[in-house]
Amino acid sequence: MAKKKSSADKINKAVETDPPKDRDEAVSLVALAISEGAKKAKDKEIIDVVAYDEPEYYDDEPITAEDATYNIIYGPRSNGKTYKMCRKILNGKFDEGLPSAYIRRLDEMIKPANLSELFNPHIEYITERSGGKYNGVTYKSRAFYLCKYNLSGDKVDQDREPFCRCYAVNTAETTKGQDAGEVKHVVFDEFITRQFYLTNEFVLFQNLLSSIVRARKGVKIWMIANTVSKYCPYFAEMGLDRIKDQKQGTIDIYTMGKTATKIAVEYCGKSAASQKVSEYYCFSNPELQMITSGDWEISLYRHIPKGINDKRPEFEFYVRFDNNIERGAIYIYNESPMIVFTRKTTEIKNPEEQIIFGDSIDDPNVLHSTTLDGSSTRAHAMILDLIKRRKTYYGTNEDGEIINNWIKWAKNGGFRL
């Protein structure tokens, strides 16, 4: 008579032919095996089958355990960073009765049309934590309130105080003098952009932060973003000089200033959730890699025309930006001038005799400038004209990123294209 197969044997056979689709299903299989009294559930046979290298969503516990004042988290899009921050805000309310603050760079992004549904994925959690007292959220006057809706969808109750107030960096001046009271967390969402940064944006952010935090201690700052651009003035202003070389899946710790403020910086890894939709972004364009993998987004730029390296440039100039040096060489190609930008890895020789643009120049030399207004010399005017007419080529896409971000930065200093 054939031996009857145990539940564990059936489960093992099932996962071999039809592996669990997600973590929940895997956990259910293990739970079933244990509940049936299957000893093999404790062995590697089942554990190996249901193991996952990547979490379903971003896990904030490792960086939370660092207990840093500033917590910077960047990585792939749609891996649950904002979701976890919203959960922190709600826990601050339910666990300690404290509200939090939510910040975006531009006022447009905290208008109801763009923000009112921020906490919608947490409605079930709100209902559970409040014991059924609240089952919804309402957003008005730049603040989120817990509320209660009846079966007809009518709001029948609302908490007196908001659990989260919202702010924008570009309207930070309007916040001065306003004290909204004690806060638990300050979440700055999407602080990295591929568009433009405000003039002195980091100073504006710090002013806004001082208006929210005041003299209170114990407030945690969370800055989260997708890897849309390696250039970010917040990195330089905060002294985060190791970010460009940071490995994905690691947390780097900085200690800053006389107060020894602790800053934890996490380059978070991929999650199973983001990988579920990776088939839609399978193309080779480097701009798409950040969506699922978290690689830094890099645009495609025109590379150096064939044969140009055999020519001698008419003259050269240099761009110092974000701790990089780019060499700009002007060539005559097909009877027309053009600029070729390539990385320079050594210091500039005889800098007092060279045309140099930069983000940290402070000397009276007419050849040196922080902006590109074309008014210093005829050479400056030619460089400006070639950039305006897009007569630019690059050794690599990385060179293009550096120059493109320099141009955006220079716009705030008087450069107009």
Image (cartoon, rainbow, N blue to C red):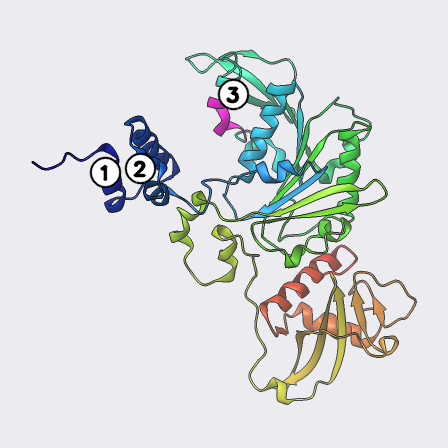
The amino acid on which the numbered mark 2 sits, given as a three-letter code, is: Lys
The amino acid on which the numbered mark 3 sits, given as a three-letter code, is: Ile
Q: Callout 3: few (<14), some (14-19), or many (20+) C-alpha neighbours within 10 Å?
A: many
Q: Which disc number belongs to residue 126?
A: 3
Q: Main secondary structure of the magenta part?
A: helix
Residue 162 sits in quarter: top right
Q: Which disc number belongs to residue 76?
A: none
- Camera-near label (2 vs 3) is 2
Viewer-proximal residue among 267 and 369: 267
Give residue 10's position: percent from left, percent from top: 22, 37
Residue holding disc 1? 9
Question: Which residue is the extreme one toward the right?
Answer: 364
The amino acid on which the numbered mark 1 sits, given as a three-letter code, is: Asp
One can see residue 417 in this view: no
Tag 1 near tag 2, CB within 8 Å: yes
Which structural element holds mark 2? helix
- Residue 183: in magenta span: no
Residue 101 sits in quarter: top right
Q: Sequence order check: which comes first, mark 1 or mark 3? A: 1
Which structural element holds mark 3? helix
Tag 2 near tag 3, CB within 8 Å: no
- Which quadrant does the C terminus fall into? bottom right
Q: Sequence order check: which comes first, mark 2 or mark 3? A: 2
What is the tally of numbered marks visible in this picture? 3
Q: Which stretch is magenta?
A: 119-127
Q: Sequence order check: which comes first, mark 1 or mark 2? A: 1
One can see residue 257 in this view: yes
Q: Is residue 83 above or below residue 78?
A: above
